[in-house]
Amino acid sequence: MPLLLKASNRHLLSSSSSSSIASMATCSSFCAQLPIPFRPVPISSSFPTNQPFKPFSAQASISPASDELFFMYKKKCLLYSPYLTKTFSVFADDGSPITVGFLGLGIMGSPMALNLIKSGCDVTVWNRTKSKCDPLISMGAKYKSSPEEVTAACDVTFAMLADPECAVEVACGNHGAVSGMGPGKGYVDVSTVDGGTSKLISGHIKASGASFLEAPVSGSKKPAEDGQLIFLTAGDKSLYETVSPFLDIMGKSRFYLGEVGNGAAMKLIVNMIMGSMMATFSEGLLLSEKVGLDPSVLVEVVSKGAISAPMYALKGPSMVKSLYPTAFPLKHQQKDMRLALGLAESVSQPTPISAAANELYKVAKSHGLSDSDFSAVIEALKGKVQS
Ligand SMILES: NC(=O)C1=CN([C@@H]2O[C@H](COP(=O)(O)OP(=O)(O)OC[C@H]3O[C@@H](n4cnc5c(N)ncnc54)[C@H](OP(=O)(O)O)[C@@H]3O)[C@@H](O)[C@H]2O)C=CC1
Ligand SMILES: O=CCCC(=O)O
């Protein structure tokens, strides 16, 4: 017989299977390591009683057979995924599904929205270039022709946009997201922008009576596809709690960092470190080659020691071949260096290494590498740069 699982602020579930389900909830770190197709979807969240949203309930039908599967999960066995992904949905208290909007279907937005759709969420999409909506529409997404229409139709709307300028344009421009917002709705900006931009958007959203959360992500194209992103959130706590089931579909971890601007700052600092790491890695690869060493061997040596990083292992082999398949566009990395340096400037923090790295990304951009992967920054260090 199916069991109805209701989320509560204690993560307790009113079912005879509560012990095994609760075990699953406490094993979230293992759960997050599973690829999306094998990952149990989140079935609990916390809902403060005084929050302005339609309260969510995570609801799932669980048969005795699937209860067995949860027990297997506790022992770190794989779950039978189709069973779970098809039975998960998030509902408002009036029984209607929580509707989700998604604005911006680029490298990151498309797989993030797709994971929501695959998990059974009711998703409405918009993108400036309409053709990028088509694959998602064919997977079951609804389509609206402006950000305003999306936010008017949806309870919560995510935005994954290129830069501060277009994040503001999509939120606050003509027929922008703000025009469709109102009390009881939420706007979650997952783009990488600076804190000032985030506060500006937040101000407009909140003036409409809606709630705002910034939630930039760590993790690139593949983690977005695999639902392994890391959300760095800040803003309305009640919205954070409301959208947590959706964040857990798209990601493996989430941080709540307090006031709007803190999520943006954390994201920019992480990417400032990453940009400098990539620049110095590039120098090392080229230096090794110049002194007669095999840069592929350098990649291997680095992978064995204390400075090993997934980024070097992932990008190194193709950098050695001068190949830069785009996961994180170089123009976005340079934007993040620029914004991080602005953050440092605002508090008089010296960042000479990052400032130097930023110059390299600017050189790479000037040589036509904006849309290549950010690992193409190595080209800025070569004597002869392809244009
Ligand atoms: N790629 C990555 O590895 C990661 C990226 N990020 C951040 O996520 C955000 C998106 O990145 P990513 O998906 O890679 O970028 P893409 O360049 O692939 O996508 C950018 C999106 O922004 C839209 N856009 C750009 N300009 C405008 C505009 N003027 N008006 C409306 N929409 C616009 C694009 O629409 P259109 O399709 O019409 O061009 C597209 O939907 C960025 O802030 C980036 O820094 C964060 C983590 C990782
Ligand atoms: O903003 C892009 C981050 C890319 C990554 O975290 O791998």
Image (tube, rainbow, N blue to C red):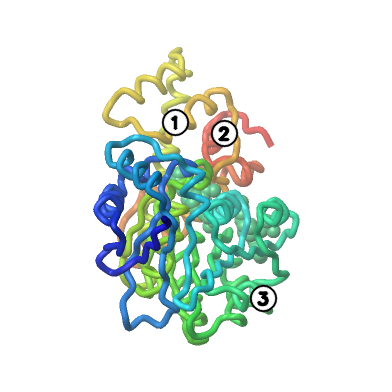
Q: Where does the image place residue 272, in percent across and percent down from the top left?
A: 40, 50
Q: Is residue 333 visible?
A: no
Q: Where does the image place residue 236, in percent across and percent down from the top left?
A: 38, 75
Whether the residues at callouts 2 and 1 have beta carbons within 8 Å, the answer is: no
Q: At 40% across and 57% down in the image, what residue appears?
A: 231
Q: How many marks?
A: 3
User: Image quadrant of residue 248?
Assistant: bottom left
Amino acid type shown at disc 2:
Glu
Q: Residue furthest top?
A: 292
Q: Residue furthest front?
A: 1
Q: Earlier in the sequence, mark 1 or mark 3?
A: 3
Mark 2 lies on residue: 379
Mark 1 lies on residue: 283
Does 334 sit left or right of 22 as displayed? right
Quadrant where the image shows the C terminus: top right
- Ligand 2 within 8 Å of disc 1? The answer is no
Mark 3 or mark 2, whichever is nearer to me: 3
Which sits in the foreground, 113 or 261?
113
Relative vertical location of residue 378 with respect to residue 291 in this rendering, above or below: below
Residue 162 is tagged as none
